[in-house]
Amino acid sequence: MEVGELQKCAFKAMFPAAIADFRPFRSSQVCQEPVVVLSVERYPRDPGSGGGLWEAPGGGDLYDLSLSEGHCRLRAVLQPSLNWMVRRNLLSSGCELSEVRLGLQYDERRLGVGVQVFVLLEAQVVSTGGCGATPAVRRLKPQKLYVFNEGTELPFGPELPIKAKRRYYLPLWDTVDYNGEAWHRHPPGQPIQQFEGSCSIDVRLLEGYTQQKKKDLPPVIVRILRKFRLYHFGRPDKYSECPFQAKFLVADKSGSATLVLWNSLCMDWYRHLEPGMVVRLHNYVVKKSYTTRMGHHPEVSNEPALELNLNPRNPAAEITVINAKNVREEWHLPELQYCFATRKEVSGLCAGDLCSIVGFVTFVGRQERIRNKERPDEFLVYRWLHLLDGTASEPFVLKLFSTSQPEIQSQISPCSLADNTVTLLVCTNVRLECKMIDPSGQTAFPYLQSTEYSQVYVNGHHHGKLYVKNPKVKEFINWIQSAKDQERDTLSHTQIGGCYTYPPLPPSERDYRREILGMSPLTTMSELKQYLNQLEYREYRQVTVQGRIKSVKYQLLGRMDEEFTEVYNAVGGTEECEELLDADQPFRGTRGNKSPVIPVMSGPPPKKQAGLSKKRKRKGAFCERKCTPVRLGKDTESTGEEENPTHHLRKHEKDMNRDASPGKGLNEELSLDAIFLPIISRLDHRAMYPAKHSNTLISILAHGGPASSQTCHTGTDSAESSTPSPGDILRSAVGLEEMLFIFILDICNQGGTNVEVVLNRAYVQHRAL
């Protein structure tokens, strides 16, 4: 049977209602069997590929899907109007769909192979990829699925985008990392075993050829000193099969230059070239550096004045890696230098200084995304880390962005007491950032941030790296081997995930106005509602709003399955609920080595979006005027299909918008629930330096948590008290409804329409803004 006939048979097996031959796109078929999404892949569209269906809202990217009902695998393009489902991680790898409606379109710009394009027009999401495996998913594992829409020829090599002439897929959540089989793990050719001859040219002599555009210059032998993040310059309005650029800082005995790989050379070589390697380059093009061409002096831009450009053609560049044992002393190549700093030394550095660090990991935050300021349609992915090196009680606090090392960064985890492992992490070329939060400048919160040429290494990737010979790295290893008791105590308090922001905000409204508010203008509640609906998956934003507190509640995060207790109502006053909660008990921490699970709020999906949807819709996190607010608690209607089983919503039984209170969300139109996670222990990974305050609710909201017994005061310098109970704090909330507050909210999309809203700080306004 020919491949075309097999396609028709397989299509009819998935769509029994289909007629013998394929219909035009306007005629679609619905699959009656459950369909599993095997993969979701992103790529830019080609110039001029718009028109009709493809001009629908959804941005410049397209998404290819691999679908299967258990017997066959079908590749299809997602209708662009449904792109938002991927961007919010509702439609993801591993999710199960029902009532799948596919259309067939003929791509008139392509000949032969692939002229038939399947388009996913509509489906219902039955379960997400994060849930337990359904029978439909389990059925796929033992089977080798037949691919039936690959055209008349068998597929060869990695699968390519369906609707664009591109040779690559992008990661779903950023454009910094490489993605897919097109990126070769091993470079073309082998390292030189015996290097014959010395016919090469010094880098310094190449400066005389920047204007001549010669293409037959002698080879140059250099050492790689820095490796920069991968850069993707693809655009929907510009066609390129491989629009990538990879930069390296290289040098020989005479000087340094920027090595630039273009297009498919990045796919061939980027994963293999590492700092410290010696390479021989031939068929390169010499140019002045980009910053020099833009009129900047090399000393100001801190970049070499020379660029060595390597292209896959015209001329076809030659790159050869020289084995370390074949590197000659007479070449006098510069050695790779590392400037390691201990945690104790970091406190003495200045903001902007560069260093490398080594430590063992005690906290790994979740991945979050922020929009790229230069390209707002793209995102930067980062996570917060804590590392200890034994030289200070405080950890390194590192904000680690993607470094184009996806395999390594996916392995970063905190140390584990269960299997007695210690995660040793090295991060090179990080920059010191420092934030003062008091007028005197005495309280500093230094942290480190990765740069565009940082490299990170964890267990399993240290072998053969030159930094293992660095004296400070050796000292750290010796300390690790001799500090077993301290290590086990530290491992028992490791944390992962959860809401984490750094540096901490100032404890007073006056300092916040001066330090932060000028750079972060106030947001109206209507604007905030729009932000919540527009956030994409894992997108993080911090917003500042003003308003009043209507009610305060206390809930142990480890007891989300119990009935919810309202302790203080700004309208009705304090309520007695002793049978559900002993409000005089001290604060309790969470069990285990995970950060607290934070309840999330669910808002409505984007309006006027047809097609792919959830079977259930949720109430919004906001409340319109005269409607019932959404409260954090237990949702008796939830089946766990849309969110983590410990993430719940509950509609509160009381109307909080009654007219009984004279002090009225300011315009009385919107109200919002937010959870406040106080820092209650010095062992909390968010705790840094203790602060003195009165332990009222107002002071706790401004400082981020209650003061300890050694630091709190009650009006006299000598008075001491223990950490207050929740009941004492909540009783101090009486009268808050008359006060106007500045609220700093951390908001982050947790998938779909679920948005986490965390109250970072709240300050009483002493004068109108």
Image (tube, rainbow, N blue to C red):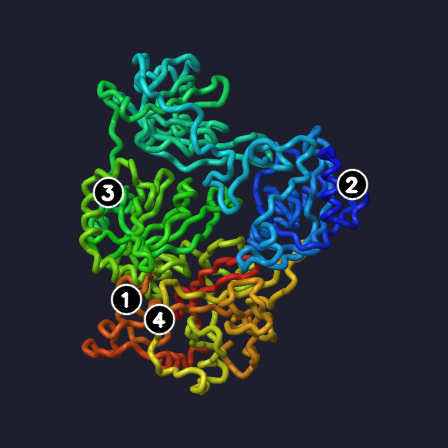
Q: Earlier in the sequence, mark 2 or mark 3?
A: 2
Q: Where is mark 2, residue-wise? A: 22
Q: Earlier in the sequence, mark 2 or mark 4?
A: 2
Q: Amino acid at mark 1?
A: Arg
Asked if the residue under mark 3 is in contact with the one under mark 1, i.e. CB atoms within 8 Å, the reply is: no
Asked if the residue under mark 4 is in contact with the one under mark 2, i.e. CB atoms within 8 Å, the reply is: no
Question: Residue 95: x percent and y percent?
Answer: 59, 54
Mark sitting on residue 589: 4
Q: Amino acid at mark 4?
A: Gly
Q: Amino acid at mark 3?
A: Phe
Say which quarter of the image contains residue 149: top right
What distance separates the C-alpha of mark 2 from that of mark 1?
A: 67 Å
Relative to 623, does residue 325 appear above or below in the rendering? Answer: above
**Would residue 609 be seen by someone viewing this image from the given angle?**
no
Question: Residue 560: x percent and y percent?
Answer: 47, 73
Q: Earlier in the sequence, mark 2 or mark 1?
A: 2
Q: Where is mark 3, residue-wise? A: 340
Residue shown at 37% from the left, 74% from the top: 698
Question: Residue 548: x percent and y percent?
Answer: 47, 72
Residues packed near mark 3 inside 10 Å, few (<14), some (14 to 19) or many (20 plus) = many
Residues packed near mark 2 inside 10 Å, few (<14), some (14 to 19) or many (20 plus) = some
Horizontal placement of 453 versus 737: left or right? left
Residues packed near mark 1 inside 10 Å, few (<14), some (14 to 19) or many (20 plus) = few
- Quadrant where the image shows the C terminus: bottom left
Mark sitting on residue 682: 1
What distance separates the C-alpha of mark 4 from that of mark 1?
A: 11 Å
User: Closer to the observer: label 2 or label 1?
Assistant: 2
Q: Secondary structure at mark 1?
A: loop
